[in-house]
Amino acid sequence: MTAGSPGAPRLLEIDGLVTHFPLPRGTFGARRKVVRAVDGVSFAVEAGEMVALVGESGSGKTTTAQSVLRMVEPTAGTIRFRGQDITALGRRPLKPVRRRMQVVYQDPYESLDPRFRIGRSVAEPLAVHGVGTRAERRDVVLRALERAGLTPAEMFADRYPHELSGGQRQRAAIAAALVLGPDLLIADEPVSMLDVSVRAGVLAVFDELRRSGLGILMITHDLSTAVHHADRIAVMYLGRIVEEGPAAEVVRNPAHPYTRALVAAVPRVGHAGRPIEIRPGEPPDPAAVPDGCRFHPRCPIAVEECARVDPALLPAAGPASHRAACPITRQEDT
C-alpha cells in the first residue's frame, strides 16, 4: 500500500454522512415516513488504499457511494476530497472534482453503449471534459485499455461490447474509469456478475491500481473478496457502520455479532470468532428503524439494554484502529 504524505489531507474523508429519502405522505394525514438509507456514516480512504464497504443487500452501501459522488444529495454530514469540502459544491465547481473520482458499476454491459465500439465508449469521458484532440484521446484510450489488462489494446478498441466476454467488458469499463486519471475509484460490486474463473484476473487489476497509488472504495457483499484484497473493512448494517478495522483483524476476530454471522457464513475464511446465527427474519425496514441498537431484533446475544441504547463505534480488542458498535462483545473481551 502506498501511504499518503505525512501531514497531507486524506484522499477521501466522510464525517457523519446522512442520506434520507422521504416517502409519499400517506392518506388521512398519516405521518410522513423517511427511508434512512445512510444514517451517520464516517470513514476515510487514503491514497494507495483499498477500503471495502461490506454488508447484505439494503444495508446502504451503494447509497453511501452515490452520496460520496454527489449522484445522490446527502441530507447531512461532510464529504472532503483531498481536504476540500465538496458537500455543497454547485454543479460547475463540482465537475473538475468528479473528474478525479470515477466509478465502476456492477454490470459491465450496462456501462457500455452497445452501439459504440469499445474505443469510443472509453473515450467518452475525455470528450465530456474536453480533454485533448481526437488523436490524443486515442493514445490515452489505448494506454487505459492496456492498464486494465486488455492487450493488444488496438484489437479491443475496435470491438463492440457484445464481442467481448463478461470479464473483458468489465476491464473495458475499468479503462473508461481510468482515462481521466482519477485519484479515487469507487467499485460497486465489480465482480459479482462475473464467472468465478475470471474474477481473480479483474481483482488483480484493482490490486495493481492500488499499488500505483489509486485510492479504491469497493462496495461488496462478499467478505472473502474483501479480506483477500482490501486493506480495511467497514461493515454496514441498516445505514450504519457497525464494525471497522484492518481487513485481516475484522475477519479473524470479528467483534460485532453481525460481522460474526457474516464470517460464519463464509467457510473458506478462517477466523477465531465463535460461530453465531442471526435470528430468523428479514432486516428491519429502513423507514422504521428500531430503537436502540438497530441489529438487536436479529441478534442472538441481545439484552434489554440493546433495545434502549444505540451504541457508538468504540475500540475493540486488538489494534487501536479496530472498532465495533457492540457493548456486549466488548464486555466479553474484557
Image: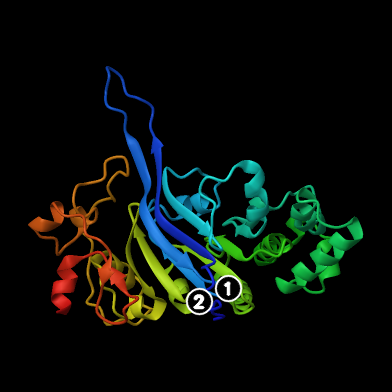
Farthest residue in the top direction? 28
Picture coordinates of residue 185, whole percent (x, y): 59, 63
Name which residue lies at 39% across and 77% down. Answer: 246
* Count of numbered marks: 2
Q: Is residue 158 above or below residue 6?
A: above
Near-viewer residue (174 or 92): 92
In the visual, does 27 lie left or right of 49?
A: left
In the visual, does 122 lie left or right of 14?
A: right
Q: CA distance from mark 1 to mark 2?
A: 8 Å
Placement of the N terminus among the 4 image quadrants: bottom right
Q: Dot 1: what SS?
A: helix
Specify whether residue 96 is in view: yes
Which numbered marker is on residue 203? 1
Which numbered marker is on residue 229? 2
Picture coordinates of residue 175, whole percent (x, y): 71, 64
In the visual, does 140 lie left or right of 303?
A: right
Name which residue lies at 59% across and 56% down. Answer: 105
| Mark 1 / mark 2, whichever is N-terminal | 1
In the rendered image, which quarter is residue 330 located in? Answer: bottom left
Amino acid type at circle 1 is Leu
Near-viewer residue (198 or 9): 9
Amino acid type at circle 2 is His
Specify whether residue 193 is in view: no
Pointer 1 with pointer 2, Cβ within 8 A: yes
In the rendered image, which quarter is residue 43 located in? Answer: bottom left
Q: Is residue 224 above or below residue 299?
A: below
